Amino acid sequence: MATGPDGQNELENIDLNPAKKFAEELRGDPMAGWLTVPVDRAELLKIKQTAEAVNQNSEYLVCVGIGGSYLGHKAIIDALIPKSKTKILYAGNNLSTLSLKKVLDEIDGKDFSVNVISKSGTTLEPSLAFEVLKKKLMERYKDEDRVKSRIFATTDARSGALHDEAEEKGYTTFVVPDNIGGRYSVLTAVGLFPLAVAGVDIDKLLFGATAEKDEFMTNLAKNSNVPSELAPLSYATIRQKYHGKYHDVEILASFEPELQTLQEWWKQLFGESEGKDGKGIFPASVIYTTDLHSLGQYLQQGRRNIIETFLKIPLEGYNDIAERATIAAHKEGKIPVFEIGVKQLDEENLGRLIYFFELSCAISAKIQGVNPFDQPGVETYKKNIKSML
């Protein structure tokens, strides 16, 4: 559902043809490998078997990575709260010594393994954390063979600093596909290995994403003009329509705190894909009802440059009432409101949602006129840090 500031249903009169054209173009894009939800059966079996071994010998798996190398799988783990013999910890997503010390203190004296996730192996934050954790492994296990058996590298298949180290040291490796960028990579080994260790049913996750893809492609092939049948294109088209009307902030809202990391993943996906060439809708997020007590006044009566997307899941009791009341209030406050429904929080539906957002984002960026798959601006701060170091 998409409701404009005047209460009209925005889905009634939208032109999906430009978005359809860009969807067809994606098939030939060298960085749209995620579009088909590719699954290497041998790699999937290896992921499951390795995850089972980690569950048997490790109380903790420390995932070392930043951005798309950790946000996607952390989002799913936080949303599902799966129970596993192995707890997932995270390092290398910042330069805080306090944050890293907390991880080191928690694993001190415990059995643990490390999954380092980096295509190049040269990104500063994970590189530094990985060096510290290798020393911690040696301190704990005191033997290089035992240490290397507890390091799992998810990296480039052929080259790069981490690939070369893994080959030299004999780490178990998983592949970051050449044709899938980090923020689109959660349904590859980047996300699937830690998810399997955490106890997530990765087959159901992939089934959901594939089902979403198949339904979309079928409706695209029959040249459907029903907005709900081409929901990713509808969402992309409407948000860019409002972008053209000077709505330059989109807020993703949820009434479930366990979805906060999923919202962080969404922010990276859209922010890094669209924010370039002086363009882009700024992605922000809120968790209600908590944020109604800090941002509610602004949302109700502040600047009208905001569109708000509600991530709707089944709610109960007061929370359900609060969601309905808030949506009604914000519509009255002349905020364009979108609603994205998720039937329930399980692997299949999260797989569907991930594919929905990835496709919507790529199409939205193309409608805007930018490349969804590069991030040239990110390199500036990295170069500055390197020169200062």
Image (tube, grey):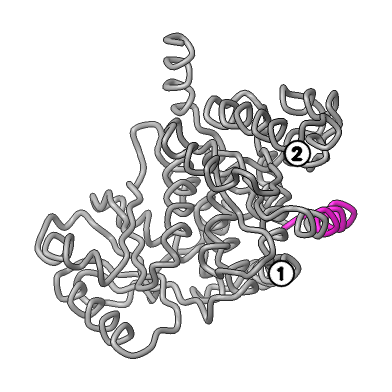
Nearer the viewer's eye, disc 1 or disc 2?
2
Give yes or no for residue 346 being in the magenta stretch.
no
Of residues 213 and 315, the one drawn nearer to the viewer in this rendering: 315
* Res 218 seen here: no
* Among the 4 quarters of the image, the one containing residue 260: bottom left
In the displayed structure, 347 sits above or below 379; it is below
The residue indicated by pointer 2 is 151
Rendering coords of residue 288 (x, y %): 29, 69
- Kindly identify the amino acid type of the residue bearing the numbered disc 1: Asp
Instruction: Tell me the residue at 26%/70% (across/down).
Output: 4
Residue 203 rendering spot, x and y as whole percentages: 76, 68
Kindly identify which residue carries mark 1: 201
User: Horizontal and vertical percent for residue 92?
Assistant: 54, 36
- Asked if residue 154 lies left or right of residue 230, the reply is right
Q: Is residue 38 magenta?
A: yes
Part of the protein shown in magenta: 37-50
Residue 78 in the image: state x and y as whole percent: 52, 63
Name of the residue lying farthest toward the front: 109
Looking at the rendered structure, the kind of residue marked 2 is: Ile
Residue at 71%, 58% (x, y): give it.
Answer: 197
Q: Is residue 89 visible?
A: yes
Residue placed most toward the observer, 284 or 303: 284
